[in-house]
Amino acid sequence: MTTASTSALDTIADLEPHHVEIVRATLPAIGANIGEITSEFYRRLFAAHPDLLRNVFNRGNQAQGEQQRALAASIATFATHLIDPDLPHPRQLLSRIGHKHASLGVLPAHYPIVHEHLFAAIVHVLGDAVTAEVAAAWDRVYWLMADTLMGFEGELYAGAGVEPGEVFREVRVIERIDDPAATATFVVEAVDAATPLPDFVPGQYVSVGVDLPDGARQLRQYSLVQAPGAGRLAFAVRRVDEIDGRPEGEVSSFLHTDVAVGDRLQITLPFGDLTVDTAASTPLVLVSAGIGITPMVGILEYLAATGSQRKVVVLHADRAEATHPLRATQADLVAGLPGAELIVWYEQPSNGAARTGFLSLDGIEVPAGADVYLCGGTGFLQATRAQLKAADIADEQIHFELFAPNDWLLDR
């Protein structure tokens, strides 16, 4: 993995003073219209390159507008940092994007394509307000962000020992484990035994690519849930059903209904920055909701496999016992770790030892100096982070991720 001391994320060039003033003056207008700008951008991009929507971008997120909000948030956050360097550094935002891009095989050649259609969209929406000076200033913002990401993604590819974009591997499913809470774990190994799958850092994920019945090739990220080693990887997939107008998950449904032991899939090498420092001995607090449990189970599997003596507090929230993914696995892993404890909340009352209601830190002792890992939906993360801050847990101790493209909005 790229270390903080060598990362391109820490060497972002400054915006030139005359561009700073223009960006500061026009940021409100860009911000007020950025939703329309990004919608127009994606319309133009997919009209010119329909293969990107079919084979790279998440069609579900596009249909729901989540990817548009993600792009808007990233550009606004980065530009705001450039005009006010005293604000929090956008390192976390850029790291999250860079790992996601690497897991999709994004190449430097993609950035000029995005630039072309993004700036055409800006001109289309803002019209005459986009003078030559304004265009030059925002062009500089874009390329500062793009150059930083390209540099970081190059580091990720080099760290994985591959050429840029060469991250896909053909694998065979050697085991499928179905969990009662509509979650399936797929254990895979490389089809080519001469090139076994690599190890990974606990908390990482792989992208899984499937060819759907309409001919599209869609990619989704799934957390790795077993301990590294033996040239095998295991990822857990919860089936996403249609609910409240949101369509069912294309890839999760395909994996659940059409993939069995012996079938072949394409996956990527592992990426992701919600990872545990395996050399540390500090306490860990693992907090999750719903399918956010999967990276936490991966971390627990690693701790169990290495005989870790670290103090571990595991907190999980779910709607009910029946919807709690990997419930038995989580309980068994915690029971096998010395000094570990598990506390569970269900919104619906249960017959077991779980607490009723929403996760609350009231009466929960967070060990001094603990690293706290969070994964779940946006509302859950916002509420939990607020509780952690109220408990005087420092921001640098809190590491978070959720399964949506706009997770950095949590800091806004």
Image (tube, rainbow, N blue to C red):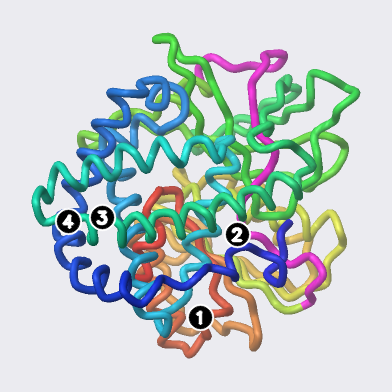
| Kind of residue at disc 2 | Leu
Using the rendered view, name the quadrant where residue 63 is placed: top left
| Kind of residue at disc 3 | Ala
Nearest the viewer among 117 and 359 is: 117
Where disc 3 sits, the SS reads helix
**Cβ atoms under marks 2 and 4 closer than 8 Å:** no
Cα distance in 3D space between marks 2 and 4 = 41 Å
Q: Is residue 266 magenta?
A: yes
Q: Which residue is mark 3?
A: 135
Q: Tell me if 140 is positioned left or right of 65 in this view.
A: right
Where disc 4 sits, the SS reads loop
Identify which residue is drawn at 40% across, 62% down. 408
Cα distance in 3D space between marks 2 and 3 = 36 Å
Magenta residues, start to end: 257-281
- The quadrant of the picture occupied by the N terminus is bottom right
Nearest the viewer among 346 and 224 is: 224
Q: Which mark is residue 131?
A: 4
Q: Which residue is mark 1?
A: 395
**Cβ atoms under marks 4 and 1 closer than 8 Å:** no
Local crowd at mark 2 within 10 Å, few (<14), some, or many (≥20)? some
Q: Which residue is mark 2?
A: 274
Of the image marks 2 and 4, the number of the one nearer the N terminus: 4
Identify which residue is drawn at 74% across, 67% down. 277
Where disc 1 sits, the SS reads helix
Of the image marks 3 and 1, the number of the one nearer the N terminus: 3
Cα distance in 3D space between marks 4 and 1 = 40 Å
Local crowd at mark 1 within 10 Å, few (<14), some, or many (≥20)? few
Of the image marks 2 and 3, the number of the one nearer the N terminus: 3
**Cβ atoms under marks 4 and 3 closer than 8 Å:** yes
Cα distance in 3D space between marks 4 and 3 = 6 Å
Where disc 2 sits, the SS reads loop
**Residue 230 percent location from the top left of the image:** 88, 37
